[in-house]
Amino acid sequence: MTDLKQLTILIVEDENDLRRETAAFLELYFRNVYQAAEGRQALALFDSEKPDMVITDIRMPIMDGIELATCLKKSSPDTPIVFCTAFTETDYLLKAIELQVAAFVRKPVQVSELIAALTRAAEPVLLRRQIGTLSSELTALVDGQLGRHPLQQAVAAQVVRVAPTTYNVLLHGETGTGKSHLASIIHSLSPRRDKPFVTIQLSTVPIHLSDSLLFGHLKGAFTGADRSRAGLVEAAESGTLFLDDIESCHAGVQAKLLRMVEQKSFTPVGSNVEKRHDVRIISASNLDLKEEVEAGRFREDLYYRLADITITLPSLRQMPEAILPLAHKFLRETSDELGRDLPSLADDAEAALSGMPWPGNIRQLKSIIRRAVLNADTVITGADIALSAGDAVHQPVLTTGIENPPPPFPCNMVDRERWSIEQALRFCDGKKMKTAEMLDMSYNTFRRKLEKYGL
């Protein structure tokens, strides 16, 4: 049931006794009830008190209800107005329709009819308020995941607006700014959150395989196609397909992607039968795709189809104030992951972090902190940061994609298990606890495997 107690209402009635009686009755239902004897007084009261709703007589001295409603619709078009009058001439009814008043209640008023009309009129107000509250809470939640810097909060606000829509999203930012993480956040906040989130890093896929990997193939479609396989588009059905490094997509696949986006259909390699799909696409690039379009390396029509909205992630150099808050966040996460007490950052460690150029952005910062936590004791010093930074520069980035084929037969189970764990780590973006959970392995057992294989 609609809760009118959240709202305030202004009653406009020139008959004093009737106005007071109605106001006393409405106080049982509304948080505040304001009273005015005619339209001009009502306008002044509306400007000062900003009530959520207005109920007004039509025939009144000085300014009548029609003129009052006309003024209110100009200044506050979303405020519901209810006419309450004994006069129901056709002209009044037509004017009420023209002004889009929320309801028309006849005098003498029936209590049940009045409350029912006010309840219906209040529903859009309460819905907008609820959406506003949820949006604020959602923005705060995304802020917590992305950070509190103004540039990060601007990104969070864009995410909150676009996540519930069906828009395709293009993420732009330097390597390591968190595009993959942001794509997963958008998916988790969308109506598709319970459906698959499928990732392909196109820069790691050989050109001759990208077509079949995305759209699938039939048995015998090419040499080595010993059986039919579904592609990632089908795997992402009703969910989200994340195309990382979209600028690496070659011209042939760009054409098929364009058709897929425009017509919501695709054709597997070796087939002449179209398949329908319902997939939202999030793309990411560390290049300016507009410049790629101008240079002739990327299709202009595909660019506009993928970039219903573009979100640009700031580099760490653009927000140096965010370095230490992010470092402390990664400290907590890594300590929890390792089951260790939270170490502190010495002053020289904070100074070292603040003074670094961060070409690898947030990914590099996280890598350095993870290494420092692993190697340090209760206090992380500047020397620990320097050592970890030197190692991190040469650390290969764990990514999702096809990088290393499985060991060829004949091979032993040790080699096969090591390869499987490596691939699982890549799939989970290096997150150990997530990888252990995916492999249905206890975290302690998983850590021993990592140590055993030097991972």
Image (cartoon, grey):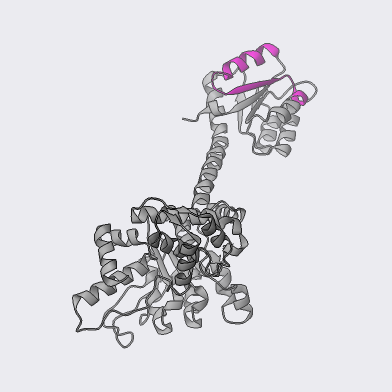
User: Which quadrant holds residue 68?
Assistant: top right
Q: Which residue is located at x 54 percent, y 22 percent?
A: 29
Residue 345, given in percent of the width and then of the height, sits at 48, 54
Placement of the C terminus among the 4 image quadrants: bottom left
Q: Is residue 321 left or right of residue 112?
A: right
Residue occupying the far top of the picture: 17
* Relative to 183, 408 lies left or right: left
Residue at 73% over, 19% down: 37
Residue 242: tell me if it is visible. Answer: yes
Relative to 238, does residue 268 appear above or below in the rendering? below
Residues drawn in magenta: 16-41
Q: Is residue 79 above or below residue 317?
A: above
Does the magenta portion include 407? no
Q: Is residue 43 left or right of residue 340?
A: right
Residue 22 on image: x %, y %: 61, 16
**Residue 314 appears in the figure:** no
Residue farthest to the right, as pictured: 62
- Which residue is drawn at the image coordinates 75% and 25% (left, top)? 39
Report which quarter residue 52 is drawn in: top right
